[in-house]
Amino acid sequence: MIVRSFKELEGTDRHIKAASGTWESKRIVLAKERVGFSVHETVLYAGTKTSMWYANHVEAVVCVEGEALLTDNETGRTYTITPGTMYLLDGHERHTMRIKEDFRCICVFNPPVTGREDHDENGVYPLLTEPEEV
């Protein structure tokens, strides 16, 4: 059994700050836990815009604080995301988040991330894996 808090991750290698300066993420469950998914608390900052495309992952996101406009870049459809709202990128949709007020969410990724990922120039997380245990 693993028990840990987001608070204890602050300032550790599980607390990632994006090179873009638009978000930070505390990764509480990672690929090295070998449970088939990862779990993160992510904060996207008010007034920012982030375009993403999880070509290698499926992501579920639940908003717990703040407000954002989510645009499906493939259809042009826009959604307002507020606390208690979930969105699921089950089709690897290219999307853009426009943050109205600091947006805190819980994210689940499959396959799990390792904790070393950041978005590349296309908004994609590379597919990184942990070495097999012997």
Image (cartoon, rainbow, N blue to C red):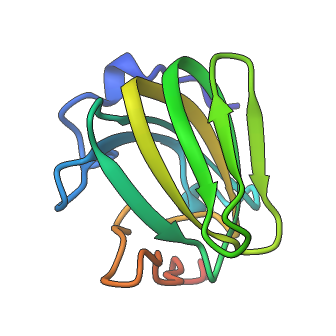
Residue 22 place in picture, x, y as percent: 25, 47
Horizontal side of 6 relative to 21 (left or right) equals right
Residue 92 occupies which quadrant of the picture?
bottom right
Q: Residue furthest front?
A: 76
Residue 77 vs 53, above or below: the answer is: above
Residue 124 place in picture, x, y as percent: 47, 78
Residue 98 vs 125, above or below: the answer is: above
Depth check: 37 or 44 in front?
44
**Residue under the image location 47 percent in, 20 percent down:** 5
Residue 71 vs 98, above or below: the answer is: below
Depth check: 115 or 109 in front?
109
Horizontal side of 23 relative to 122 (left or right) equals left
Quadrant of image for the N terminus: top right
Horizontal side of 85 relative to 11 (left or right) equals right
Residue 100 vs 113, above or below: the answer is: above
Count of numbered badges drawn on the protein: 0
Residue 134 place in picture, x, y as percent: 61, 82
Residue 87 occupies which quadrant of the picture?
top right
Residue 51 place in picture, x, y as percent: 43, 64
**Residue under the image location 34 percent in, 51 percent down:** 49
Depth check: 104 or 34 in front?
104
**Residue under the image location 55 percent in, 30 percent down:** 105
